[in-house]
Amino acid sequence: MMKISVEQNAILKALAHTQSVVERRQTIPILANVLLEADKDEVLLKATDNELEIAEKIPAKVETAGAVTVPAHKLYDIVRRLPEGAELSMELSEETNQVNLVSGRAKFSLASIAPEGFPSMAKEETPISFDLEAGLLIGLINQTSFAVSVEETRYNLNGIYLHSKADALIAVATDGHRLALTKTALPEGVKDIPGVIIPRKTIAEVAKLAAENVENVHISLSANQIRFKMNDVELSSRLVDGTYPDYEKVIPANNDKTLEADAKALANVIERVSVVSEKSRGIKLSLRENLLQVSAAAVDEGSAEDELDAVYTGEEMDIGFNFRYLLDILAQVKGQNVKMLLQDGVSPVILQDAADSSSLFVLMPMRV
C-alpha cells in the first residue's frame, strides 16, 4: 500500500531524467519501470538499464509510505500532459495491483510490478572523488563525445577515456577515423586519476543533467564504477571493461606545415560544396599560398568548388577528408580561427582552435 501526492512540475522533471535512462525495448519487464519509494516527506525515483542507474529525490505528501514500480514512459507521458503545477495523487491498489493516479478530473490506472524484483546497482567503494565545475565537465564531454565510436565490436572505444597526466585532467575519444582530446586543470586535492572509460550513454546523460542549473558535480570512481552527484540527482554507471589504446601514438609529431583560416567561413564553404558529395562524403582541400580551395566531385552527383582566404605559405598540397568528420571538429572551435598542422596529403592532420591549445583534434585523410 502506498499513497502520495506530488506537484506536477517536481515529478515531471525527475521523470524526464529517469525515463531517459530506461530503454524502450526491454526483454526484462521490470527494467521498463521506474521505482518510486515513498517515505516521510519525499519520494525517491529510480531507473536502471542494468549498466546505468539514476536516482532522484523529490518532495511529496506521503500519506502511506511504500514502494511501487510503474511503466516509466507511460507515467512520464501522463504527467507531462497534466496542467502545469497541478497536484497528482498516486495510490497503489492492493486488490488490483494497479497504481491509480488522480489529478483534478483526470484519472488513470497503470499496471505495476512488485518492487522487490527491481534491480539495484551494487555500490562499490569509490576511493577517488573530486568536485568539478559543471561547465568544465560539459566542456570535456562536448569537445570529445562526437568522436566516440559507435561500433559495438570496438567496445573499448565506446566511451570517453578519462585520466590524469601531470597536473591535467584529460578526456579522449576516438573511433579510428578521428581523435578528440581536451584537458583542464586537475581538480584540487586530487593527485592522480587512473584511466577509466565512461560509456557513451552515461556521457550523454551526464551532459544533460549537468546543464540544468548545476554549479558543481561530485564525481567518485573505482576501477569498475563511476558516480556523478549533482543537486538531488545521483547517476551511477559501470565503466567499460577494456584497455584504451595508446592514443598518443596517433598524434602526429612531424606536421610542420601550418594553415590558419576562419573556422565558420571554412565550415560554410564545406557545407556548400558537400551538397554534391552526400553519398561519398569526400571533399578535397587544396592548399595554395594564402588560399584554401575546397572542391568535391562525384560521378552520379556532380561537382562543386569554392575558396576562402587563409594564412598558408608552405608547398602546395591536396588532401581529402570525410566532410562530416571535418565539420564535427570545426563545430568545436569556439574562437575565430582554426589552425591545421599538416605533413603531406596522406598523413593525419592536427586541428586546433588557434586561440586555445587545451583541445586537440586529429583527423585521418581519405582518398577523393
Image (spheres, grey):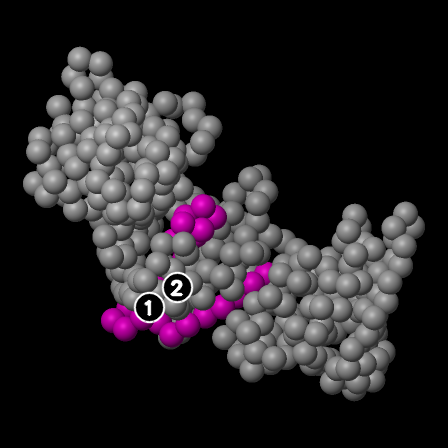
Residue under label 2: 137
Q: Are marks 2 and 1 in contact (CB under 8 Å)?
A: yes
Q: Amino acid at mark 2?
A: Leu
Q: Is residue 289 above or below residue 65?
A: below
| Secondary structure type for disc 2 | helix
Crowdedness of circle 2 by 10 Å Cα count: few (<14), some, many (20+)? some
Instruction: Please provide percent x and percent y for residue 197.
Output: 44, 52
Mark linked to residue 18: none
Residue 317 seen in the current view = yes
Between 185 and 218, the one nearer to me in the picture:
218
Q: Is residue 337 above or below residue 118?
A: below
Q: Residue at x 78, y 71 (%)?
A: 344
Quadrant that contains the N terminus: top left
At x 23%, y 24%, the residue is: 100
On the rendered structure, is 314 left or right of 159? right
Query: Residue, x 24% and y 34% (percent of image)?
Result: 104
Give the image quarter of residue 218: bottom left
Q: Which residue is mark 1?
A: 133
- Three-letter code for the amino acid on which mark 1 is drawn: Glu
Residue beneath the point at 25% across and 39% down: 45
Q: Nearer the viewer, residue 65 or 117?
A: 65
The residues tagged by marks 2 and 1 sit, at their Cα atoms, a distance apart of 6 Å
Q: Secondary structure at mark 1?
A: strand
Residue 180 lies in quadrant: bottom right
Q: Whole-percent x and y of residue 77? A: 38, 35
Q: Give, as a single range, the part of the protein colored magenta.
A: 179-206
Q: Quadrant of the C terminus?
A: bottom right
Residue 127 position in % (x across, y down): 24, 56
